[in-house]
Structures are given as structure tokens and as C-alpha cells.
Amino acid sequence: MKPPQPARGGGLEFNMTPMIDVVFLLIIFFLVSSHLAQQESRWELALPRAKTGLDAPRQPRPRVVVNVLPQGLTIVAGRNVGPDELERLLRHERQRAGEELELLIRTDQQVPYQRVEPLLGAAARAGVWRVAFAVYPKRD
């Protein structure tokens, strides 16, 4: 049997298939992760109205979004968490993101303060001092 002969005058050829596979996997990863990040702030909540407040900063900060549902559930990243688990999560995120970490609390206007106060305590124990509440501006 005769062995195959290399093509004459041909140079090196690169197999682009693995690189194309990696690029498509990265595209899918970023599409899914951006969808999950947007999903946190899309829970249907009747946010409270505020007379005063500040707009969100133009430079986005690392942020943990906590949703407090009218049924009393506290949701972070699609999971129901308690104050102790929230504190562990905030400690971990603070170590990763540093002093700039912000806690954004989104709560229904019917949720009593007794359900929000443990979240503030967990943030303080974890060393997170930037806490914001999502609200609607008060209508005149």
C-alpha cells in the first residue's frame, strides 16, 4: 500500500473547527448569563413610591439583587434564601467585588418592614454598606 503524499507547494493548514466551536459556546454562555442577570430585576412587584431619591449611578457597580415577594419569600438569583444564607452570599460577593458591592432590595409595597430589616442586618454583618431600594417616583 502506498503512503499518502503531502500536497505540493502547500503550506500549513489550520483546522478552524475547534475555534468556531469555542466562539459559539462563548456566545451562548454570554446570552444565557445576560438573560439571567436581567431576570432578577423583572419580578412583577408593585414597588413602593418615594417622594425623594437618586437615579441609579451611570457607572454600574457590582450588585446583588434581592426580591422580597408579597408572600414573604426572599429571592436571590432565583432561589429562596434566609437572612443567614444571604449573609454568607454577601460575604462571598464582597470578597470577590470589594467595597463597591451594592445590595439592591426590590420589595412589594405591601411587605412590612419586619421582612426587610433582617436583610439590612445581614448586609451590615457582611460589611456591605451600599444598600439601595428600588422604588417608583411619587406621582403628583
Image (spheres, helix red, strand yellow):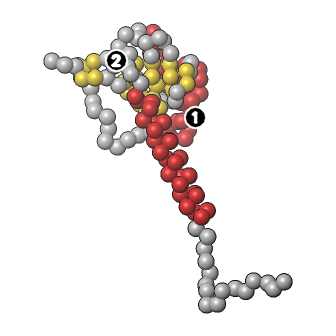
Q: Position of residue 42 (x, y in %)?
A: 40, 28
Q: Is residue 102 left or right of residue 17?
A: left
What amino acid is at disc 1?
His
Q: Position of residue 15 (x, y in %)?
A: 61, 70
> What quarter of the picture does the C terminus occupy?
top left
Which disc number belongs to residue 92?
1
Identify the residue at horizontal 35%, vertical 13% (top origin).
109
Q: Single out the residue that lies furthest toward the front.
A: 1
Q: Please determine whether, in this image, residue 48 is positioned above or below residue 61.
A: above
Secondary structure, mark 1, is: helix
Identify the residue at horizontal 75%, vertical 83% (top origin).
4
Q: Residues within 10 Å of mark 1 (few under 14, many from 20)?
A: few
Q: Single out the residue that lies furthest toward the right.
A: 1
Q: Please determine whether, in this image, residue 36 is positioned above or below residue 3.
A: above
Q: Position of residue 120 (x, y in %)?
A: 46, 20
* Along the viewing direction, whichever of 23 and 65 lies nearer the viewer: 23
Q: Position of residue 40 (x, y in %)?
A: 45, 30
Q: Select label 2 or label 1 by which is in front.
A: 2
Q: Single out the residue that lies furthest toward the left.
A: 140
> What quarter of the picture does the N terminus occupy?
bottom right
Q: Residues within 10 Å of mark 2 (few under 14, many from 20)?
A: some
Which quarter of the picture shows residue 111? top left
Identify the residue at horizontal 46%, vertical 41% (top origin).
34
Identify the residue at horizontal 52%, vertical 27% (top origin).
78
Residue underneath mark 2:
46
* Along the viewing direction, whichever of 69 and 31 lies nearer the viewer: 31
Whether residue 130 appears in this view of the structure is yes
What amino acid is at disc 2?
Ala
- Give whichever of discs 2 and 1 has the lower sequence position: 2
Secondary structure, mark 2, is: loop
Distance of label 2 from label 1 (alpha carbons): 30 Å
Q: Please determine whether, in this image, residue 39 is positioned above or below residue 58.
A: above
